[in-house]
Image (cartoon, rainbow, N blue to C red):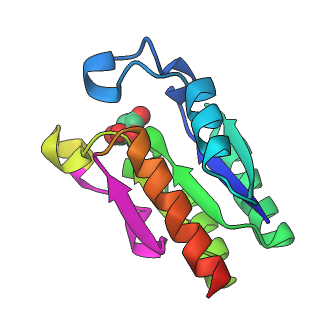
Amino acid sequence: TTVLVLNGPNLGRLGTREPDVYGSGTLDDLRVRLEAEASGLTIDLRQTDDEATLIGWLHEAVDTSSPVILNPAAFTHYSYALSDAAKLVTSAGLILVEVHLSNPHAREQFRHTSVISAVATGVIAGFGFDSYSLALSLVRSRLVR
Ligand code: DQA
């Protein structure tokens, strides 16, 4: 099984972007870490700043029956288009874990709203790269059940 690990806008800048908030690891570091934890699963980690591309990847998840770990970044807070696409994934019976490096609820008011959470299987936020690792172990346990 291939797990799509999809990352939204500005996450390509991890490592140098607000390291006090997001940590000093890069997306490549994250990929290496998740691959080390994959144990039999294939990790397909991608990042885009483009909403249409991200939506296309969610459609692809439906077409290929792939579980999704999604950090929608700022799209979390306002993209109804991405929300509808995420709903396609969970409506198809696939797991979609919304992840965040930071805890958006502990930050600015505009980050307190997620238009993704209501259509996600669940949410993990505030644990840096551990948020993704936790999501990966959830994906694994759901797959073997
Ligand atoms: C984020 C939180 C969002 O509010 C922010 O826009 C991001 C990253 C996180 O992983 O903590 O870009 O999704």
Q: Is residue 115 magenta?
A: yes
Ligand 1, seen in the image, is in the quarter at: top left
- Residue at 64% from the left image edge and 42% from the top image edge: 36
Which of the pair 145/101 is nearer the observer? 145
Left or right of 72 on screen, residue 22: left
Q: How many marks?
A: 0
Which of the pair 114/29 is nearer the observer? 29
Query: Is 50 placed above or below 105 here?
Result: above
* Residue 129, position as x, y percentages in the image: 43, 39
Residue that extends furthest to the bottom in the rendered view of this protein: 145
- Residue at 66% from the left image edge and 82% from the top image edge: 144
Stretch of the chain drawn in magenta: 112-126
- Residue at 44% from the left image edge and 57% from the top image edge: 134
Left or right of 71 on screen, residue 90: right
Query: Is 137 placed above or below 50 here?
Result: below
Q: Is residue 78 magenta?
A: no
Residue that extends furthest to the top in the rendered view of this protein: 16
Kindly indicate the quadrant of the structure image that contains residue 106: top left
What quarter of the picture does the N terminus occupy?
Answer: bottom right
- Residue at 38% from the left image edge and 63% from the top image edge: 123
Which of the pair 18/48 is nearer the observer? 18
Residue 94 is at least partly visible in this image: yes
Residue 87 is at least partly visible in this image: no
What quarter of the picture does the C terminus occupy?
Answer: bottom right
Kindly indicate the quadrant of the structure image that contains residue 29: top right
Query: Is 87 placed above or below 107 here?
Result: below
Residue that extends furthest to the right in the rendered view of this protein: 64
